[in-house]
Image (cartoon, rainbow, N blue to C red):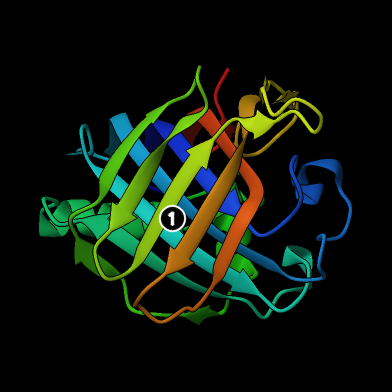
Amino acid sequence: MTEWSIKARELANCNCNYGCPCQFGVLPTTGNCEAVVVYDIEQGHYGDTKLDGLKAAGVYKWPGAIHEGNGQMQLIVDERATADQKAALEAIMTGEDTDEMATMWFVFSKMAPNRHPTLSAAIEADWDQEDRTGKAKVAGVFDIDVGPIPNIVTGDPHRVSIQLPNGFEFRHAEMASGTSRTSGGEISMQFSGTHAHLANLNLTHKGVAA
């Protein structure tokens, strides 16, 4: 097994209610799961291949809950990545060289057997985890915009965070409201005012690092 590690900022938006039922072990809000996720890698490696400063993304769609399988996925890798870096990110994000069930990438890949070809593209990403604001984009593939969850009465920013001591993605994440749409690629989706989260990831082939 090739050892790897990634420290990255994550921005995710899915089609479910705020908080995301998956985080609580219950079924999706509308019965199916759709999501766009972007990763801004601050530090990482796959064996001897450095991944510092690269970005990556994934578009995912399941007909039911994730654990029911039969989903589809498409990865997008930073156009600046070398051939070795692209191969490394594909391996990590498809669950290769990863202990069983140790990361969300392992689970997503196993539950999404319909895998579309990986794209190489410029990934634009700019967000503030503390303010829960930002956006990400891959031209011709997807757009994401996020902002604070509005208070149901006043409309003021409503701050909520989730702690997952035993999570396989993050230990802490800030909740937000997101809007996403795909404009190309192989997977079609569009949703607005749904769950989004911003988190700092620290993952290895063995799972979330302490």
Position of residue 156 measured from the top left corner of the image (x, y, whole percent): 67, 22
Above or below — where is 102 with respect to 192? Answer: above
Above or below — where is 45 with respect to 95? Answer: above
Q: Nearer the viewer, residue 68 or 14?
A: 14
Q: Nearer the viewer, residue 111 or 60?
A: 60
Q: Nearer the viewer, residue 155 or 51?
A: 155
The image quadrant of residue 30 is bottom right
Above or below — where is 172 with respect to 88? Answer: above
- Say which amino acid is labelled 1: Met
Q: Which residue is mark 1?
A: 93
For image coordinates 57% across by 56% down, the residue present is 106
- Farthest residue toward the right? 26
Specify whether 120 is left or right of 171.
left
- Residue 205 shows in the view: no
Report how many numbered discs are placed on residues in the image. Answer: 1
Density class for disc 1 (Cα within 10 Å; few <14, some 14-19, many ≥20) is many
Position of residue 93 measured from the top left corner of the image (x, y, whole percent): 43, 55
For image coordinates 56% across by 47% down, the residue present is 178
Q: Quadrant of the C terminus?
A: top right
For image coordinates 77% across by 74% down, the residue present is 64
Q: Nearer the viewer, residue 131 or 187?
A: 131
Specify whether 82 is left or right of 56.
left
- Residue 170 shows in the view: yes
Specify whether 125 is left or right of 81.
right
Position of residue 152 measured from the top left corner of the image (x, y, whole percent): 80, 33
Above or below — where is 101 with respect to 127? Answer: below
For image coordinates 31% across by 62% down, the residue present is 76
Specify whether 171 is left or right of 117.
right
Position of residue 11 measured from the top left corner of the image (x, y, whole percent): 47, 40
> What element does badge 1 sit on?
helix
